Each structure stands twice: as structure tokens, then as C-alpha cells.
Image (spheres, rainbow, N blue to C red):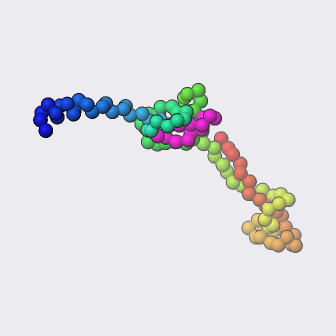
Amino acid sequence: MTEEEFWAILHTVSESKPISYRLYYNADGSPIIYSMEDLLDNYIEVDQKTYVLAPFNVKVVNGELTHIKPVVTVKKIQPGTVGTACDPCDVCVVVGTDQSHTKWTIVNNEIN
């Protein structure tokens, strides 16, 4: 290879595309995938830190990334007409439905 051929080949190499970190999202703004590829969907560009963390507790609103505050769920037992039959004096003792009992069920309570 001659020097002229080397420089000719070097100058024919195309410029690389700039790096683009993208978050593709649904019509409602919920995230689908973080990618650096050019896909055929709605997307916004995000910074490298967001791309690396790839959080899914986000939503796209008016082209801006909005973080959604996580909901804290507390499980609690509650007496009712359905559930596990327990001794009326001690919820830790499971009894048959033919005995005197109180039925308990697990409910989820969300708090902020």
C-alpha cells in the first residue's frame, strides 16, 4: 500500500454518528425501553446518568421526563366476612369454620 492509498482510504471513512441516549415511551408517557438505537417510536433524549440508571418510575409529560414518587404499601389484617377463620381471642390460632371464629383477611393500604 502506498502512502497516497493510505490517505485516500483514511479520508473515505465516514464520520461516526453522535452518541444519543434515548428513552422510548408509549402514548400515555410510560417508558418502554432505554436505547441508543434509532427505533420507530416516540422518544426523548436523556443524559448518560439517566440512561445508565434506566429508571422506570418516570413518565414523559410534554416532552419532559418526570419522576413518579414511589407509593408505599402497608399490608394489614382486617376482620371481615371472608378470610381465614381464627380464634376470637387470638388471631394467631387458626380454627375450623365449625368453631366460634373471626375471619381475617390481608388488605393493602397505600400511604404517601
Residue numbers of the magenta segment: 23-35
* Left or right relative to 97: residue 111: left
58 is within the stretch colored magenta? no
Outermost residue toward the top?
A: 62
Residue 48 occupies quadrant: top left
Residue 17 appears anywhere in the view: yes
27 is within the stretch colored magenta? yes
Front position in the image: 4 or 64:
4
Q: Position of residue 35 (x, y in %)?
A: 46, 40
**Dominant secondary structure, magenta:** strand
Front position in the image: 4 or 94:
4
Front position in the image: 101 or 14:
14
Q: Position of residue 38 (x, y in %)?
A: 46, 36
Front position in the image: 35 or 55:
35
* Left or right relative to 9: residue 57: right
61 w.r.t. 108: above or below:
above
Residue 27 occupies quadrant: top right
